[in-house]
Image (cartoon, rainbow, N blue to C red):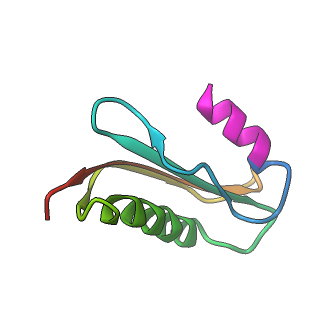
Amino acid sequence: MKKLIFLAVALSGCAAVHSGVIPDGKDSYTVIVSQGHSSASAGDLKALAYKEAGAFCKKDHKAIETISEKVVQEGLLSDTAEADLKFRCIEP
């Protein structure tokens, strides 16, 4: 459901769309950054996702531990690049 809502928002504009930090299980979170109709690379969006996750963990003086990441570059059937980062905050 969260991805469906995010996809609708992402397709509505050209600027990078951030999902914000979404709780995704016990002590884990997800950040999704998407951009359509742009020259932004999926790598750039991945960096933005890590920056947002880092700021979230830093508030509690913790560090990011990556659980999984998915990066999709726009292609023939899609004009949207997306980075999906699942992480947890751990003691440094």
Q: Which residues are magenta?
A: 1-9
Image height check: is 7 above or below 56?
A: above
Residue 50 image position (x, y, % from top left): 42, 64
> Horizontal placement of 13 versus 69: left or right?
right
> Horizontal placement of 85 versus 78: left or right?
left
Query: Which residue does the image show at 28% across and 59% down from the upper left?
Result: 60
User: Is 83 a magenta residue?
Assistant: no
Q: Residue furthest right?
A: 12
User: Is 4 a magenta residue?
Assistant: yes
Query: Which residue does the image show at 14% across and 58% down from the upper left?
Result: 91
Query: Which residue does the image show at 28% across and 37% down from the upper left?
Result: 27
Determine the image quadrant of residue 57: bottom left
Closest to the observer, 12 or 73: 12
Query: Which residue does the image show at 40% across and 59% down from the upper left?
Result: 56
> Horizontal placement of 81 versus 54: left or right?
right
**How many marks overall?**
0
